[in-house]
Amino acid sequence: MRVIIIGGGQVGTELADRLSREQDVVVIEKNAAMAQRIEAAMDLMVINGNGASVQVLEKAGIREAKLLIAVTEIDEVNIIACMLAKNYGVETTVARIRNTEYEEGSRVLTNEQLGIDIIINPERVAAQEIAKMIKSPNISEVEYYADGRVLIIGYYIKKDSPSLNKKVSDIRFPEGCIVCAILRESGEIVIPSGEDVIFLNDEIYLLGKTEVFSHPWFNHIAPSYPRKVVIAGGGKVGLQLAEMLEAEGNKFMVKLIERDSSRGEEIANLLNKTLVLQGDVTDIHFLKAEEIGKADVLVAVTGDDEINLLSTLLADHLGVKVTISEVIRSDYNIIHNSIGIDRMVSPRLLTAAQIIKLIRKGDVISMTILKEDKAEVMELFVSERALIANKKLMEVNLPRGILVAGLVRDKEIIIPGGEDFIFAGDRVIVFYLTELSPEVDKFFTHTEKGPTENIGQMFRNIIRGK
């Protein structure tokens, strides 16, 4: 399938890298130097030109394309590219739109009239993810599957954890949940056997029926709800995050720090309950004067990785309980991991995770990218021709690193063991290391059809939670 990506920035290159492994990808980038770098780094066609130009789109093979993704920094270019693509008969168009004036309900033209099937707003996605983290500071991940009937949570092993220094097989978890994965402090992800031991500061992923997580066993990981939140940075992410926290009523006391005084005044006029401060988030004297060390959470979303890094380090030094940092550049993940920042959010990866669902093979229902792209969770229907279909799980010999964590058959939720059969048409939830995604395709979605035919409708259903 031909996929055209317009825009070779962080999101565009992330998508190009992922999609080119399985699809015929063409990247259009206006900046000549950037286009040359992409062409040198990746085995794909790169065209230097304007993605809103008919001539450039035709050179990219727009007539054969089924998917166009416009992720330039300019909303209007993305919109025009999608409008042109629809006129050429492209099945599905995705546009990165930042300006809230283009949101549905706030403009005259509808998405259909603009030629856009899906709007992606990286800053809003990042703000939503951070808001979720703030509400559950001791829980690293919360994801629902099977129409809300199955839940995956990630949490950190502390000194008071009943699981500390125990083999997985020796831990008496409530019936109906299993350990999907263990993330070591070193960054290694383990899909565990019963012999694996859980250590201090490990991050544990559990999957189970949603109602199981109300069991008293989980009381020790229940979050201590934060009250005082400091947002470092008044850009699009910071403003939207403050608005989301304000919408929670009086649950949060929010301070937002913005260096630019005129931007600070603009934000103050848009917010109702947030205290907006003008100052430098890397100035420790300023942070002390404003008693930032008493905050429960500090979120660094300045748009500059170096400033985010320094401000979170200073916040941790001053005694802030939880630090969350936005990461723009992919090569900064290693630094953030090594210095112990509590949580990281990458708009680039969050956006790529949403779009990547478009091109997955088979009947994919939902997909989540975890831990900076180290692991994935996929919910899908088992193909009739899949290697795993109509066999006992123990007979299939799945590679280590792939775990069938749950399945739905009719109305029944099953946490499968080796003796359980996986039938064609079963709805399965698979936890696996990202590097093994081709193996997941082979075992679960092997089919002569190739990529999902109606990718547009599938993606719309995913976004709407159907």
Image (tube, grey):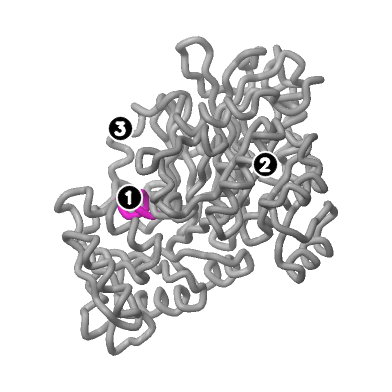
Q: Earlier in the sequence, mark 3 or mark 2?
A: 2
- Residue at horizontal 73 percent and vertical 45 percent from the top: 4
Q: Position of residue 259 (x, y in %)?
A: 34, 80
Per the picture, the main secondary structure of the magenta-coloured stretch is helix
- Residue at horizontal 33 percent and vertical 47 percent from the top: 221
Please say whether residue 210 is one of the residues in the magenta stretch: no
Q: Earlier in the sequence, mark 1 or mark 2?
A: 2
Please say whether residue 132 is one of the residues in the magenta stretch: yes
Q: Nearer the viewer, residue 35 or 349?
A: 35
Query: Magenta residues, as a range?
Result: 130-135
The vertical placement of 68 against 9, above or below, is above
Q: Is residue 357 left or right of residue 29?
A: left
Local crowd size for mark 2, using a 10 Å CA cut-off: few (<14), some (14–19), many (≥20): many
In contact (CB < 8 Å): disc 1 and disc 2: no
- Residue at horizontal 42 percent and vertical 67 percent from the top: 301
Q: Which residue is mark 1?
A: 136
Mark carried by residue 153 = none
Amino acid type for the residue under numbered disc 1: Ser
Can residue 192 be seen from the camera position used here?
no
Q: Which residue is mark 2?
A: 68
Please identify the quarter of the rendering in which residue 177 is found: top left
Amino acid type for the residue under numbered disc 2: Leu
3D distance between C-alphas at marks 1 and 2: 36 Å
- How many marks can you see? 3
Amino acid type for the residue under numbered disc 3: His
Q: Earlier in the sequence, mark 1 or mark 3?
A: 1
Q: Nearer the viewer, residue 400 or 356?
A: 356
Q: Position of residue 438 (x, y in %)?
A: 76, 37
